[in-house]
Amino acid sequence: MSSQYSPILIARGDADCFLLPSMANRHGLIAGATGTGKTVTLQTLAESFSAIGVPVFLADIKGDLTGISQPGATNPKVLDRVRQLKLEDFGPIACPVTLWDVFGAQGHPVRATISEMGPLLLSRLLQLNETQEGVLHLVFKIADENGLLLLDLKDLRSMLQYLGDNASEFTTQYGRISAASIGTMQRSLMMLEQQGAEKFFAEPALNLDDLLQTDSQGRGVVNIVAADKLMQSPRVYATFLLWLLSELFENLPEVGDVQKPKLVFFFDEAHLLFNEIPAPLLEKIEQVVRLVRSKGVGIYFVTQNPCDIPDQVLGQLGNRVQHALRAFTPRDQKAVKAAAETFRVNPSLDTETVLTELGVGEALVSFLDERGQPSIVQRAFICPPKSQLGPITVAQRQELMRTSVVAGVYEAAVDRESAYERLQSALGTPPSASATKTGQPPTSPEEGGFFSRFFGGGNAPAPIAPLPGTGSARKSSRRESESLMTAAAKSAARSIGSSMGREIMRGVFGNVFGGGGRRR
């Protein structure tokens, strides 16, 4: 398929290496040992995507990618590379940037609700075993059936506490709920709180539209998440990016083949995503990577070695930039050979040997051609970025946050009525009191147990009020409409009856559609 967008020059050697915008959503890989130039390659790609109007999302692990927001200075090394590659019309540019931070210190806060995260991702985050994961799924199911919103950590903790204290009420319908499993999850939640997770699990939740912005000149906004502190908890970092990827997958419409991506998503330190990953979650990740292309999203994994990526995912990464690999041990030598074999052979190039000889900023490059086939691998130097190399100052960061299109939208957290508040209110009257007074034996929750007595059992919850004053009139209107749709959807789901499990549909990673106030 031809594109109205010109090919993007990424590297130059014996032959020029162009990335076709129409093939950029076929995913990619940036790999190489520490210090070989992966970060600069990432910045060059992000800068190039922004220039053609494609929004970008990336995590800034080392804190030096924010320089993309400033015009490049007269760096001698950059100028030498420009002369070496004979790059014409090379001039300093700055990309539009929005800064984000899960902890709200170095950027606008990024938040999600417990319901949006879903039980599958939460199980990985809490490092639960199969039995404990089953209990967590049960917590979500019971909350769904009774219109109890799981928005923040205290909502989840209160649900776990009630299920633990009143496990006998649910045994007949759901099976035995282990007190040990409840205790393990409560301790894991406490550890998350100590790591600052209560700042992430809150509202207002991130509106995905805010990641798909372009500026007045049509350039794509580069969304940078400060990840230096987040990386202190690698599992939290990986789960956060995986959640965001799943949200994009579930919310964006199908677009098929596109002339350029709607968003390019860079997953740095990708090996953290696949460390000790259970098979069911790996299967879901593979599914997302395979299908999100049709949503117009390109995923680029950044890691030290291609072997860090499972084969079923690696096989879907058509655009590749491979920096130098080290071969100090037998295992390293096997990795070099495996990486060399993934490229389309260049008869004039000994790929395996070259992989260990590449200099800083030099790489083996292979992008997809117009037919979607990998091009012959080329040894080339990556074009230097036109924006600033290195981090920005504190004053520059504050100015970017002040002038951002989302300034003031996410700064103030909102705590609306949810499971915690409703459970606290209901527990003012002991749940066993009514059964004791009437002399009737306890029954299952749907037939008159705790939730039936206090919340009306399986009846649909009342429409949830929209969040107050956290965005424009357009966003407020969308929240109101969504709240009504949420209530209607839950009512319809519950009308199916217990034979269908009375469950709200969950997405690919176990998310609740609309259950946590998701904004589209």
Image (cartoon, rainbow, N blue to C red):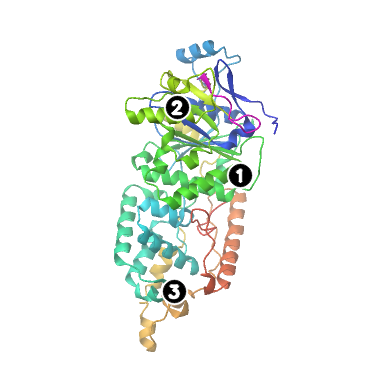
Q: CA distance from mark 1 to mark 2?
A: 27 Å
Residue at the front extreme of this rendering:
347
Q: Main secondary structure of the magenta part?
A: loop
On screen, residue 191 versus residue 482, left or right, reads left
Q: Amino acid at mark 1?
A: Lys
Mark 3 / mark 1, whichever is N-terminal:
1
Which residue position is annotated with label 3? 451
Quadrant containing the N terminus in the rendered view = top right
On screen, residue 317 versus residue 162, left or right, reads right
User: Callout 1: helix, strand or loop?
Assistant: helix
Q: Amino acid at mark 2?
A: Lys
Whether residue 174 is visible:
yes
Mark 2 / mark 3, whichever is N-terminal:
2
Q: CA distance from mark 2 to mark 3?
A: 54 Å
Picture coordinates of residue 342, whole percent (x, y): 49, 31
Dot 2 crowding, Cα within 10 Å, few <14, some 14–19, many 20+: many
- Does 341 lie within the magenta span? no
Q: CA distance from mark 3 to mark 1?
A: 40 Å
Which residue position is annotated with label 1? 295
Picture coordinates of residue 203, whole percent (x, y): 47, 52
Report the magenta residues as a range: 368-382
Q: Is residue 270 above or below residue 157?
A: above
Residue at 55 percent across and 34 percent down: it is 318
User: Callout 3: helix, strand or loop?
Assistant: helix
Assess whether mark 2 and mark 1 are in contact (beta carbons under 8 angstroms): no
Camera-nearest label, 3 or 1:
1
Which residue position is annotated with label 2? 38
Q: Amino acid at mark 3?
A: Phe
User: Callout 2: helix, strand or loop?
Assistant: helix
Dot 3 crowding, Cα within 10 Å, few <14, some 14–19, many 20+: many
